[in-house]
Amino acid sequence: MTKTKHATPADWLGWRDAFLEMLIASRGASIATRDSYRRDLDDFFAYASAHKLNMLKLGHHEITNYLADLTARHMASATLARRRSCLTQWFKFLISERHITENPVLLVQGPKRSRTLPKLLSKAEVQQLIAATRANVTLEGLRLNALMEIIYASGMRVSELVTLTTQHIQRNPKKPKQIAPYFMVTGKGKKDRIVPLHATAIEALQRYLDVREQFIPKNRDSRYLFPSHGKEPHLTRQRFGQMLKKLCMDAGIDPSRCSPHTLRHSFATHLLEGGADLRVIQELLGHTDIATTQIYTHVADARLKKVVGSKHPLAKKR
């Protein structure tokens, strides 16, 4: 039963924009989450239009068929789970706006998600990448060195890294020129947390700050720590990802193993292997649930088993 019997695709888009605004205003969703939900909904809208579905009269059969279509497109189980979650929130929003009275997704079984261990780099490989940036004394090299040092020192999400502003830099009140060894960042859910900066990262940041103005477009000010000449006022996640891929190739590391998130995974795993407490790592990463952080114990265990299997004299095949 619905309040409105029919809605046009133009109505869908209007509701979509209101839904996305609600995600940020009421739930503290990140810009990246909003953009992901927009892409997910646009794909669903395209499917609904192609199959001449009425958005206000959908049942669980239509949702099941849509998810089956995604499976036929060889989408990963994690992507399917996110699409289902997006649709659940979407129809919940339509209910709150009194366009519909029932959520058709609730009767649809979610796809089973297989646990896959995150990709990561060894300590030696990360040091190899950072060493390559230190050897590059160009303006771009100084910027990339600062980016690499900061993300590996702090474990920040890439979206948090590229949207840092100069206001995030903390100073010693007694020595204004001295950079404090931490940033205060706002992560998912609008939650603030402190992320560390060791001495080497601070030195890289200071060298970059000396040339930062070279990256600011002429006749324009910028509050972002890593400004850009592109459409976005700051360096984008995609651009940093491209820079990282090239850095890996230059350093002789398979670029398919490298991504900004790989560095975050490596940060957490290397801390755990070094003896850091899991709760501390949870705080540093900004995870709400300790279960999310526990994946790194599986990564560390897998790495230890691999080392024992390949290095222990009695574990080798005769």
Image (cartoon, rainbow, N blue to C red):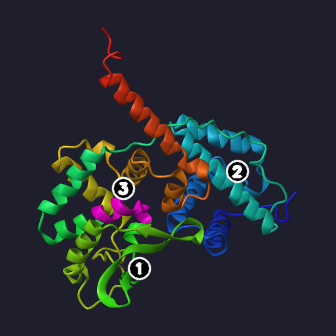
Kind of residue sitting beneath label 1: His
Residue 260 numbered mark, or none: 3
Tell me where the magenta segment starts and ends, as one range. 148-159
Q: CA distance from mark 3 to mark 1?
A: 20 Å
**Quarter holding the C terminus?**
top left
Q: Which residue is mark 1?
A: 168
Q: Is residue 171 above or below residue 276?
A: below
Residue at left offset 74%, top offset 41% = 108
Number of numbered discs present? Answer: 3
Helix, strand or loop under label 3:
helix
Helix, strand or loop under label 2:
loop
Residue at left offset 48%, top offset 44% = 296
Kind of residue sitting beneath label 2: Leu
Q: CA distance from mark 2 to mark 3?
A: 39 Å
Residue 161 locus on image (x, y percent): 39, 67
* Sequence-first tag of 2 and 3: 2
Residue 113 locus on image (x, y percent): 59, 38
Q: Is residue 187 left or right of residue 60?
A: left
**Quarter holding the N terminus?**
bottom right
Residue 41 numbered mark, or none: none
Residue at left offset 17%, top offset 48% = 251
Residue 27 locus on image (x, y percent): 65, 69
Residue at left offset 60%, top offset 72% = 24
For this orientation, the residue located farthest to the right is 1
Kind of residue sitting beneath label 3: Pro
Q: Is residue 150 magenta?
A: yes
Q: Which residue is mark 2?
A: 53
